[in-house]
Image (cartoon, grey):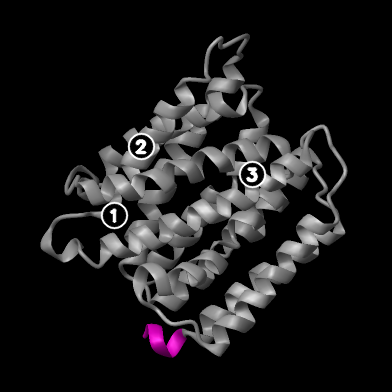
């Protein structure tokens, strides 16, 4: 169990470096998205045997919102702060709860309403105060809008992955296959906007290599291995390492300050997710 916890935390820490690494590359958001997704998909394909099985029309359907999540998150990070892009993606549970009755037949209860209200409060704090343009966040309004879209796309992805997981016992419809297909689809779509490539440096390609091999490939490998050994509640809480550390890396490496309202909104979102996970513990055990 200790090994699984360490793997999960390390994987979440790798995930958390995505925002600052995306900003560190001088390539455009489309270019980073293309090369990052392509390399990450290939690494997952090599590391996880299940990712090479169960390619069906259902996994391809789930790959579409996954590809949208990858693309929108990268573009958002180029325009707004890493903290905002991450916090806005973390609002996905709000949309998951809204989609639950429609797609999964799950009812919304009073506890869910309180959780959803907290996430909305966090959203208002992040979006309502706009934020000043920075060297690392030149268009925060557009970036925040893309961040909101990332949260919606991630919600659709999570809902789809749960749907596939419920069918994976038969050996078909593996969630990992949808992840790889999503990465490759994101690379194909972004590929239409890659050229002309322009001037690049060795630093740019080192960043791309890090993003694909470590921040996506290795991180996903570690997280999926550990999730199979840990309770759902513990997994949910440990994964909060990602949104907690994302703004820290951006502040330490790029001196990026998202502002007090955004940090307060992010804290509300993280705290709400943590409390909600704890309250759901009896049902998850």
Q: CA distance from mark 2 to mark 1?
A: 13 Å
- Secondary structure under tag 3 reads helix
- Secondary structure under tag 2 reads helix
Q: Which residue is mark 1?
A: 175
Q: CA distance from mark 1 to mark 3?
A: 25 Å
Answer whether residue 223 is visible to the viewer in this image.
yes
Nearer-N-terminus badge (1/3): 3
Task: State the residue in front, 109 or 263.
Answer: 109
State the residue at coordinates (40%, 27%): 188
- Secondary structure under tag 1 reads helix
Q: CA distance from mark 2 to mark 3?
A: 23 Å
Q: Position of residue 77 (x, y in %)?
A: 66, 40
Q: Which residue is mark 2?
A: 41
Image vertical order of residue 173 relative to residue 23, above or below: below
State the residue at coordinates (72%, 67%): 122
State the residue at coordinates (68%, 75%): 118
In front: mark 1 or mark 3? 3
State the residue at coordinates (52%, 64%): 239
Q: Position of residue 254 (x, y in %)?
A: 76, 38
Q: Which residue is mark 3?
A: 146
Task: State the residue in front, 4 or 31.
Answer: 31
């Amino acid at each position: 169990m200790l090994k699984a916890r360490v793997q999960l935390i390390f994987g979440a820490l790798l995930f958390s470096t995505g925002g600052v690494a995306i900003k560190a590359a001088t390539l455009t958001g489309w270019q980073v998205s293309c090369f990052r997704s392509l390399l990450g998909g290939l690494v997952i394909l090599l590391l996880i045997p299940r990712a090479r099985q169960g390619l069906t029309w259902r996994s391809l359907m789930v790959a579409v919102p996954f590809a949208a999540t990858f693309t929108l998150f990268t573009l958002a990070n180029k325009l707004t702060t890493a903290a905002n892009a991450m916090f806005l993606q973390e609002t996905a549970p709000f949309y998951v709860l809204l989609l639950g009755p429609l797609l999964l037949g799950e009812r919304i209860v009073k506890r869910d309403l309180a959780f959803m209200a907290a996430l909305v409060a966090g959203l208002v704090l992040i979006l309502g105060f706009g934020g000043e343009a920075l060297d690392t966040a030149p268009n925060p309004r557009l970036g925040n809008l893309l961040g909101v879209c990332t949260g919606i796309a991630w919600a659709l992805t999570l809902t789809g992955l749960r749907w596939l997981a419920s069918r994976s016992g038969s050996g078909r419809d593996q969630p990992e296959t949808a992840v790889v297909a999503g990465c490759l689809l994101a690379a194909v779509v972004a590929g239409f906007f890659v050229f002309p490539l322009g001037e690049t440096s060795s630093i740019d390609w080192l960043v791309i290599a890090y993003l694909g091999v470590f921040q996506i490939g290795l991180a996903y490998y570690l997280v999926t291995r550990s999730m199979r050994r840990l309770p759902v509640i513990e997994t949910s809480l440990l994964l909060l390492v990602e949104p907690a550390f994302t703004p820290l890396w951006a502040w330490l490496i790029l001196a990026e300050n998202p502002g007090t309202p955004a940090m307060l909104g992010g804290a509300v979102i993280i705290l709400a997710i943590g409390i909600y996970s704890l309250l759901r513990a009896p049902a998850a055990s």
